[in-house]
Image (cartoon, rainbow, N blue to C red):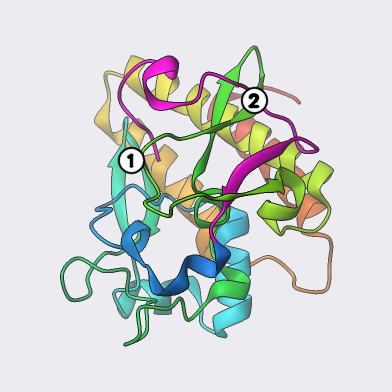
């Protein structure tokens, strides 16, 4: 999710790494689900999110779309999936009647990150604490690596970085195209290669992603990686 304003306006002004401690602990939210409501199309899903969600839910990408749990939107010319806020009062469709997450163990990366964010700079990124976003009072200190609750964190960070800059590259590429058909072709390739076509569950996701990333770059940009 992008936030408008300068880095100083939306954060505590500090950049954090995986092993840093930050005041983000919310004691299990204590029944609060504010951050799961009214988010519109801002909870954008990357391929690893979809892998976690489809494996955890036992449903395909297409099934999640058909059931209205996720939806597609255009972000700077690129079509990407996001969590659908189609429940009562604009709530996430994965909330139960008590306002608790039904897919907490396989929730998306942005949900795991909140109230932290990522700032991308110089081909990499760091974490920051978003201010005035979580209404929990007196949060406890937690290590960012533990807060993310994601295995193989180093591989995951490298993947997140590659995906972000790949999408950034594509938005710039699509913006240069005068032919709308080319943009449509790019979007169909992205959806098919990274979302619709499932990743093998018993094989390393990050290795599979790397192969798909390289072949997709060649197909779209004509670059040998």
Is residue 139 part of the magenta span, yes or no? no
Q: Residue at x 57, y 85 (%)?
A: 58
Instruction: State the separation of the CA atoms marked 2 and 1.
Output: 29 Å
What label does residue 184 carry, if any? 1
Query: x, y percentage for residue 152?
Result: 84, 53
The answer to whether residue 152 is above or below residue 176 is below
Q: Residue at x 67, y 53 (%)?
A: 148
| Quarter residue 18 falls in | top right
| Quarter residue 112 falls in | bottom right
Query: x, y percentage for residue 92?
Result: 32, 69
Along the viewing direction, whichever of 162 and 129 lies nearer the viewer: 129
For marks 2 and 1, the one nearer the N-term is 2
- In-image side of 127 versus 108 (left or right): right
Q: Residue at x 31, y 55 (%)?
A: 72
Give the farthest residue toward the top.
122
Is residue 18 part of the magenta span, yes or no? yes
Q: Which residue is mark 2?
A: 125
Which image quarter is the C terminus in?
A: top right
| Mark 1 crowd level (few <14, some 14–19, many ≥20, 10 Å Cα) | some
| Mark 2 crowd level (few <14, some 14–19, many ≥20, 10 Å Cα) | some
- In-image side of 209 versus 177 (left or right): right
């Amino acid at each position: 999710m992008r936030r408008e304003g300068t880095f100083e306006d939306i954060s505590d002004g500090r950049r954090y790494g995986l092993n840093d401690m930050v005041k983000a602990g919310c004691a299990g939210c204590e029944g609060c689900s504010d951050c799961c409501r009214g988010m519109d199309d801002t909870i954008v899903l990357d391929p690893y999110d979809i892998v976690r969600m489809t494996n955890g839910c036992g449903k395909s990408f297409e099934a999640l779309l058909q059931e209205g749990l996720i939806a597609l939107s255009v972000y700077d010319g690129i079509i990407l999936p996001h969590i659908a806020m189609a429940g009562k009062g604009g709530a996430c469709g994965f909330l139960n009647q008590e306002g608790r997450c039904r897919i907490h163990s396989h929730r998306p990366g942005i949900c795991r990150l909140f109230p932290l964010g990522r700032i991308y700079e110089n081909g990499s990124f760091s974490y920051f604490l978003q201010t005035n976003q979580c209404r929990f009072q007196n949060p406890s200190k937690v290590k960012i690596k533990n807060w993310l609750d994601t295995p193989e964190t180093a591989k995951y960070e490298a993947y997140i970085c590659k995906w972000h800059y790949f999408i950034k590259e594509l938005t710039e590429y699509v913006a240069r195209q005068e032919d709308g058909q080319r943009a449509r072709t790019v979007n169909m390739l992205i959806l098919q290669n990274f979302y619709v076509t499932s990743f093998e569950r018993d094989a390393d996701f990050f290795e599979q992603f790397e192969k798909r990333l390289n072949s997709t770059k060649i197909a779209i940009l004509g670059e040998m990686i």
